[in-house]
Amino acid sequence: MNTRWNINKSVDKQLVDSLSESLGIDKNLSTLLVQRGIKNFEEARDFFRPSLEHLHDPFMMKDMDKAVERVIKAIDNGEKILIYGDYDVDGTTAVALIYTYLKNIVNKKKIEFYIPDRYDEGYGISYKGIDYARDNGFSLIIVLDCGIKAVEKIEYANEFNIDFIICDHHRPGDEIPNAVAVLDSKRSDCEYPYKELSGCGVGFKLITALSMTLNRSIDEVYELLDLVAVSIAADIVPITGENRVLAYYGLQQINKNPRPGIEAVLSHANVFRIDDDVQSNKEQPHNVLNKEVTISDLVFMIGPRINAAGRLEKASDSVRLLIADRKEHAEKLAAGINNLNAKRRELDNEITKEALSMIERDTRLRDAKSTVLFNENWQKGVIGIVASRLTDSYYRPTIVLTRSNNLITGSARSIRSFDIYDAIDNCSDLLEHFGGHKYAAGLSLKPENLPEFMRRFEEYVSANIENEELVPELNVDLEINFSDITPKFVRVLKQFAPFGPGNMSPVFLTKNVVDAGTSRSVGDKKHLKLTIFQQNAPDNIFAGIAFQKGHIYNRVHSREPFDMCYCIEKNFWQGKTNLQLNVKDIKFSEEY
């Protein structure tokens, strides 16, 4: 598909000049700041130097006082507390966060965690989980990353005098569950200033409020920020406002003093290695970082591995990994989870091939405005990944469905401009359950409703999406020359991190780029390893990588000039770190 380049030109030049002068940086960098809504020196300072003091008072969140009061009552009365969370990364990190904090306050025999089985219980609060609490004497359940729509489940729990504190970040339905406390800044009656916390982030606000009330050291809370950072990255929430602060300090902790579970996972991803010098002295093995861990590493290295346990077996193993105190125990759990992740990759690649083949063989599917596929034999744990891959391939709202017991269950993924939650909500009368976000959702329905759901979903998408929205779009921040990429420029640009939704790594456009003569195709000729310069400046050579661009090698190698969009990054390879241009797209003159 030909990608449309959307070049950002809406910038106040007067603000750019003012920031450039007050900060002592060039106008390209100040332009990037203005594009991010930064208007003066003070806002730039806060952006470049995130502070934990910028976090909001947790008691601004609706029901926080009730939640804290109920937890303290349970502690004082010696009640048993069950910590219940979703089986994805956000849910398991949130459970690990609350469990780790409370185990320093509560008798360990009085707390336990519970992760529902993806296949047996499905998403969210389950009747089986409530029955487990009832049968084992738990009178308080703290539920994380789910529960905002569990109206009937909470009523069922109330029959047994089991209280719930819900910590969720998904969109509420028309009715708020009748729990002791419902913490969700997306509630219409909640005045909490920041609306984009992860589920683990909401849990973080709860333990912050507990710490304040119990007059405990806030350091106990801040030591858990690595878990919050992993949740923010894996759940793809905006890295703005509070999330930027939480991610910034969480990453610092991971890079300086990661918990054993995170260190073990990163070791399997080859981000940590054994220090050879220490080993040669026959001292205790010590792991050191190969590279600085970034949000991207959390997304692509930690997230899939933590998720793998819940996708194929039990997500409770992920929680055990994250709460592990001993490195030996963490390593054993991480090894098992790494093996599951390898199996997961094989499985989702196989299903993706099958799904793409289904579309290619069916004219109706190829010509549709949406993709809805069903195969009762597909693995439920990987259909969300498959939906994402199909969205990348066909760039349209996508739902992948499979059978789960007596129901059909599915995962939905969307494109940049389309709210897939609203599309699913429009078909809610056909569904047993649904929930999620603008860009990702889950749903379940009875088999007899599938044909009508597929018809109505496609009908809604067709009526509410424009043809131009079905063309992939690359947002370009700024056109620059290679000569603008100076050491100071790179140093300041690094301080824009952590990058993610709402603060993406800047995408630059440089025109009239030419191969320096040593570019080559790599990875079975799928990708391009570039050495390039800008026409008329042959001494300013940069290295680059262009994934999935191997098919244009001959044109590049022929020295035909091209324009390219890219991000500037550091690349670690064979013990060395070098500047690299990560190429997002390339266009030759006739492709405009």
Image (tube, rainbow, N blue to C red):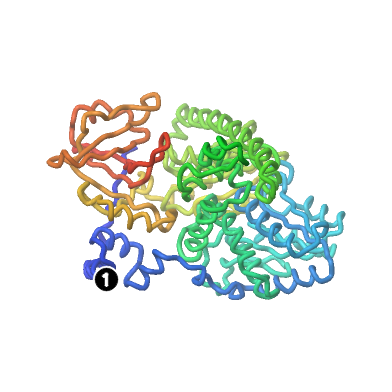
Residue 413 in picture, x, y percent from top left: 51, 46
Q: Which residue is drawn at 57% across and 37% down?
A: 281
Q: Which residue lies furthest to the front in this view?
A: 281
- What x and y, as percent, mark residue 317? 70, 43
Quarter of the image where one finds residue 517 = top left
Q: Could you tell me if residue 381 is visible in this image?
A: yes
In the displayed structure, 357 sits above or below 271; it is above
Q: Quadrant of residue 168?
A: bottom right
Depth check, front residue: 336 or 479: 336
Most foreground residue, 591 or 85 = 85
Relative image position of residue 111 (x, y in whole percent): 78, 58
Residue shown at 38%/58% (left/top)?
495
In this figure, what is the number of numbered marks?
1
The image shows residue 160, relative to residue 561, as above or below, that is below
Q: Is residue 112 left or right of residue 481?
A: right
Q: From where the camera sits, is residue 426 visible? A: no
Foreground of the two, 462 or 442: 442
Which residue shows up at 34% across the image and 36% down it? 546
Task: Specify the amino acid type for callout 1.
Answer: Ser
Q: In which quarter of the image is the N terminus?
A: top left
Counting from the top left corner in percent of width and height, residue 503 is at: 40, 57
Left of 275 or right of it: where is 79?
Answer: right
Q: Nearer the viewer, residue 159 or 329?
A: 329
Q: Going 71% across and 46% down the picture, which residue do you hit?
A: 316
Q: Name the residue under label 1.
A: 22
Rendering quarter of residue 555:
top left
Return the residue found at the far left: 536
Q: Residues within 10 Å of mark 1 (few under 14, many from 20)?
A: few
In the figure, is residue 140 to the left or right of 481? right
For mark 1, give the secondary structure: helix
